[in-house]
Amino acid sequence: MDKQLEILKSLTDANGVSGFETEVKELMRDYLEPNSDSIIEDNLGGIFGKKDAKSGNKTILIGGHLDEIGFMITEIDEKGYLKFTPIGGWWNQVLLSQRMTVVTEKGNLVGVVGSKPPHVLSPEERKKPVDLKDMFIDIGVASKEEAEAVGVQLGDIIVPYTEFTQMANKDYLLAKAFDNRYGCALAVEVLEKLKDVDTNINVVSGATVQEEVGLRGAKTAAYKVKPDLAIAVDVGLATDSPGMDSRNGKGNLGEGPLLLLLDGSNIGHVGFRRHIQKVAKDKNINVQLQAIPGGGTDAGSFHTSHEGVPSVAIGVPLRYMHSNVSIMHRQDFKDAVDLVVEIIKSLDDETVDSIKW
């Protein structure tokens, strides 16, 4: 496994739901420090490497987010079954019988979301999705006391268990938490590629916290960094699997990174988006345009900070987002890295001013 895959594997294997990002943050610190002039952290937990400009005073913020969706334990019943509440957006239909990792102070435990055998279900029950509030996790104990003895406490987190895998076509990568360890890995690679390059803009590249619960860490990061431009690097919708609709733009795996026209939190800054499209065309990097009527990215908080920060979101198409597994195409990741690097190289004080209104 080459270095790029090792980084993607380590970041997606790490467990860090919103508010519990420590394990991912420490990995990011290790990856960012060798290619940064300094490390910037905010008080909620965001971490960024900074590359100082050779000339110029403007700053661009490149932000992934450390957190993934998951669950928190809210009850341990008398038989040791765990009740939970979601952290981030889940569709209950993807959860039954899925293997989970229960993260405790004593170590990780294996769990599974319980489900009834079809033999005992009526025809009506088989058609009806199970509500999240009625689900439970089985960790293989017989009592509440036994669960507590192995370290389970209220407030512990639960994350899906999925092994990082190269699929039949080795460029198709399967893992949990590509949303948004993709953005974390991109932030790392951008600084690595720029290490020996003189830039005319300060580059602050890393990841925020608590994006999945309301873009919270993006607020603190933007106030800490005070950028002139910002790019949220996050995943977008793959539209090339059965049942997906491409009426709001294309998202085919292997056909290039996504440039979001808008989502539920941000209208991509027109001047900045057009500049990015020109850079992509000049550098022969294919870009897919997409609009996502719902949801949001950290650009939603970046762009309203201070006096306003022109912001866009750049992603990759991701299949099966916000579920136990997801699939990303490696070439899309590589092209997204190259695109962000070329955007940075194209910027100086004058260009930044021309991008704004």
Image: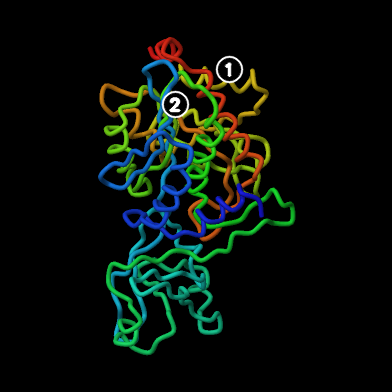
Instruction: Give the SS element for disc 1.
Output: helix
N-term mark: 1 or 2: 2
Q: Is residue 261 above or below residue 65?
A: above
- Residue found at x 46% / y 12%: 351
Label drawn at residue 268: 2
- Name the residue at the bottom extreme: 142
Q: Is residue 104 above or below residue 250?
A: below
Q: Residue at x 49, y 21 (%)?
A: 199
| Relative height, residue 262 to residue 134 (above, below) | above
Q: Residues within 10 Å of mark 2 (few under 14, many from 20)?
A: many
Distance of label 1 from label 2 (alpha carbons): 15 Å
Which element type, helix, strand or loop, lies under badge 2?
loop
Residue shown at the point (45%, 62%) measured from the top left: 92
Amino acid type of disc 1? Lys
Residue 264: x and y in percent read 40, 36
Residue position for label 1: 278
Q: Quadrant of the N terminus?
A: bottom right
| Between 62 and 145, the one nearer to me in the picture | 62
Measured as percent of width and height from the top left, residue 312 is found at: 45, 28
Kind of residue indicated by mark 2: Gly
| x, y percent for residue 47 | 36, 43
